[in-house]
Image (cartoon, rainbow, N blue to C red):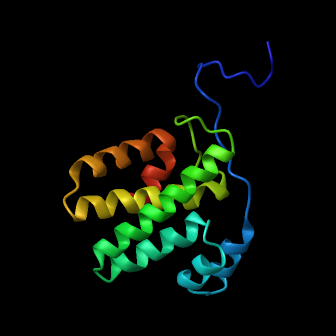
Amino acid sequence: MAIHENLLGGPPPTHLPDDPGPRELLAAGTTPADVAAKYPTSSLAWARLADEAFERGSVVESYAYARTGYHRGLDALRRSGWKGHGPVPWEHEPNRGFLRALHALARAAQAIGEEEEYERCSQFLKDSSPTAAEVLG
């Protein structure tokens, strides 16, 4: 038996490659819009744009930003070998942009009355990372 064999029979966790550029710019105070313009594939930048829009009451704008971050994240997950299901651990920091975008999409969907999408995204977040679902609320 291999030492790293998954005894539960599910897919292994997906760990996105680290891309510190967007994270470092955001930490240094660069606006999410500027980071998204420089790094348009960064789910983290789009998630931060979604959060800002939601906080100021621009729910439809938040939904659009979150959907962009979500789809950019799905692209990255697929490039990393993800097959449409399985763990995407919050504990691996590069995964957090996607998980934040997924959370933001669920939140905005609920706010505009898209109950099916809210439920789907909320369950997807819980299935991907119970820790992220707990941390992000």
- In percent of the image, x 22 and y 51: which residue is there? 115
Left or right position of 113 against 61: left
Q: Is residue 64 left or right of residue 81?
A: left
Query: Is the residue 83 above or below the residue 40 in the image?
Result: above
Quarter of the rendering containing residue 28: bottom right
Based on the displayed image, in which of its 4 quarters is residue 66 positioned?
Answer: bottom left
Q: In this view, does 35 lie above or below 19?
A: below
Vertical relation: 75 (above or below) 63: above
Quadrant of the snapshot with the C terminus: bottom left
- The x and y percentages for residue 33 are 53, 83
Q: Pick the quarter of the image with the N terminus.
A: top right
Q: Where is residue 47 in the image (x, y as percent from the top left)?
A: 49, 68
Task: Give the image quarter of residue 124.
Answer: top left
Give percent across and percent down for residue 110.
Answer: 25, 59
Residue found at the very far top of the displayed protein = 1
Residue 111 sits above or below residue 24 on the image: above
Residue at position x 48%, y 57% in the image: 70
**Residue 37 or residue 4, whichever sits in front:** 37
Left or right: 1 in relation to 8: right
Whether residue 25 sits left or right of residue 127 in the image: it is right
User: Residue 72: where, in percent of width, then height?
Assistant: 56, 59
Of the pair 11 and 6, the residue shown nearer to us: 11
**Residue at the location (74% across, 59% down)?**
18
Give the mark count. Answer: 0
**Residue occupying the far left of the picture:** 113
Is residue 137 or residue 84 the one in the foreground? Answer: 84
